Image (cartoon, rainbow, N blue to C red):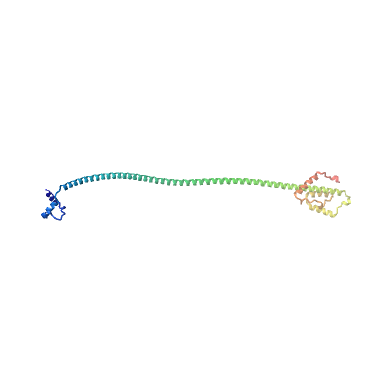
Amino acid sequence: MKKTNGTEQHQGDPEADGGAFDWETLPDLAKDRWEEAVAYDLTVETQLANAQSNRSQAEVERQRVAGEILEATREVCHEIASDARKALDSAKHMEIDATRKHLEAEAANKSAESRLREADANSEMIVNHARQEAEAIMSRGRADAEKESEQIIQQTTLQARKMLAQVEMMKEAAQEEMETQRIYTQVSRLKAESLEALSEVKGWVDQPPESQEPSEEDNGDSSQSLAVTGDPLWEEVAGALSVEHVGPPTTDELPEIESEPLEASAHANGQAENDASKPRPSKKAGK
């Protein structure tokens, strides 16, 4: 039986023979030797059975370990997949949040641009309004200033005219005063000349009749003196003296008053008034 098993085993396994020879073609000696070499040994079979059992256990253990490894790997993969899904969900949420923020930023940018344009328009409008108000204020101020300047000019012109009128009036008053002083001077001179002429007439009347006849030279000098003076008052006095056949005073005896200034005329006027206050001799007393 053992031989049969060994023969069957070797006959049924052509690959075990190596494929180099055929069992049927072997000689008997070789077959015997082969059968002896491969004789069945119970120990070897037991070892083989143990080895096969160990192999089965190892295979089971291998399958168990492989299952555990596969399960652990599956769990790790599930965890990794779950983490990946969570990360993907978080990334999606972050992407959505980023998209939302991007849209919000674009909306804020558009709103800022719109507000900037509105601010520019408002600033331009405010500047134009302020410029118009400033121009209006300047126009009103200029008009008020021109009006005030015109009023000041009118007032100044009126005051200047008043002052000019006052100056003219003062000038006219001064001229009138000068004319009055001149008249007073002439009157004083005439008074003095009249007094002097009367005193001379008085002295001439007191002389004897022989010495009263004037010479031709005296007549010429007297007529020349009358012609030189040309004063109406003096001519009137001279006419009165000529009617009485009295010789007028010569030109050398007349005082030169017209060439004196106004202060001398005023002094002469005061002196004449003092002389006028003195008692004057009458014609009857002289005669």
Residue 261 point in image, percent of width and height? 75, 50
- Residue nearest the viewer, comparing 23 with 78: 23
Residue 44 falls left or right of residue 130: left
- Residue nearest the viewer, comparing 130 with 205: 130
Residue 112 point in image, percent of width and height? 43, 46
Residue 110 falls left or right of residue 242: left
Residue 259 point in image, percent of width and height? 76, 52
- Residue nearest the viewer, comparing 283 with 1: 1
* Image label count: 0
Residue 73 falls left or right of residue 205: left
Residue 36 point in image, percent of width and height? 13, 51
Determine the residue located farthest toward the left in the rendered image: 28
Residue 137 falls left or right of residue 95: right
- Residue nearest the viewer, comparing 117 with 212: 117
Quarter of the image holding residue 108?
Answer: top left
